[in-house]
Image: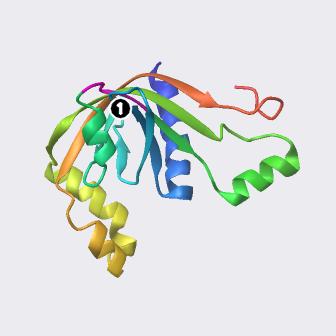
Amino acid sequence: MNLQDWKHIQKIAAAAQQSSMHCSIATVDQNLQPTITPIGTLFLHEATFSGFFFDTYSEALQENLPQNPKGCIQFINSSKLFWLRALVQGQFQDFPGVRLYAEIGDLRPASAAEMALVNQRIKALSWTKGSQLIWNDFKLVRDFNVHDYKWVKYPHMMPDH
């Protein structure tokens, strides 16, 4: 992976998070059973192949990661316009998603800069009752380092990259 790949990953991840408001993190439990956790507060670092996410409600991650810190983070662009355009044209203009293979770290207190990023992301909905119930207790984050990635592709509909 190089910086150009990482910039492209960031672009695909941003479109996916904008369209679905979350990404998914797959981990395995002690019996090697997979679990997928939706996370709406994941951020990719600008120039390093890494990021962080706020981990408040994810019981499965808290149980699974001490035994196996590896995870697969998946971003899928679920925009209806993105998909309709691709289906009508018979070709995607870009990848519909990406999977990041990562090593996920332990919980740690969020920094002031990280708190500012999450507050910016949830600001538009901060007035809602639901927002106040689920997004007011963010204090802990997990860092992750990406060691590989794989584009989500559909045969015969991919642009030349």
Give the side of residue 123 with respect to residue 77, left or right. Answer: left
Position of residue 72 measured from the top left corner of the image (x, y, whole percent): 45, 31
> Which amino acid, mark 1?
Asp
Residue shown at 66% from the left, 37% from the top: 95
Q: Quadrant of the C terminus?
A: top right
Q: Nearer the viewer, residue 41 or 15?
A: 41
Q: Nearer the viewer, residue 112 or 137?
A: 137
Give the side of residue 19 with respect to residue 83, left or right. Answer: left
Q: Nearer the viewer, residue 122 or 23?
A: 23
Furthest residue to the front?
Answer: 31
Query: Is residue 121 on the magenta stretch?
Result: no
User: Which residues make up the magenta segment?
Assistant: 67-72
Residue shown at 47% from the left, 18% from the top: 1
Residue shown at 36% from the left, 47% from the top: 42
Relative to 69, residue 46 above or below? below
Residue bearing the label numbered 1 = 29
Q: Nearer the viewer, residue 39 or 112?
A: 39
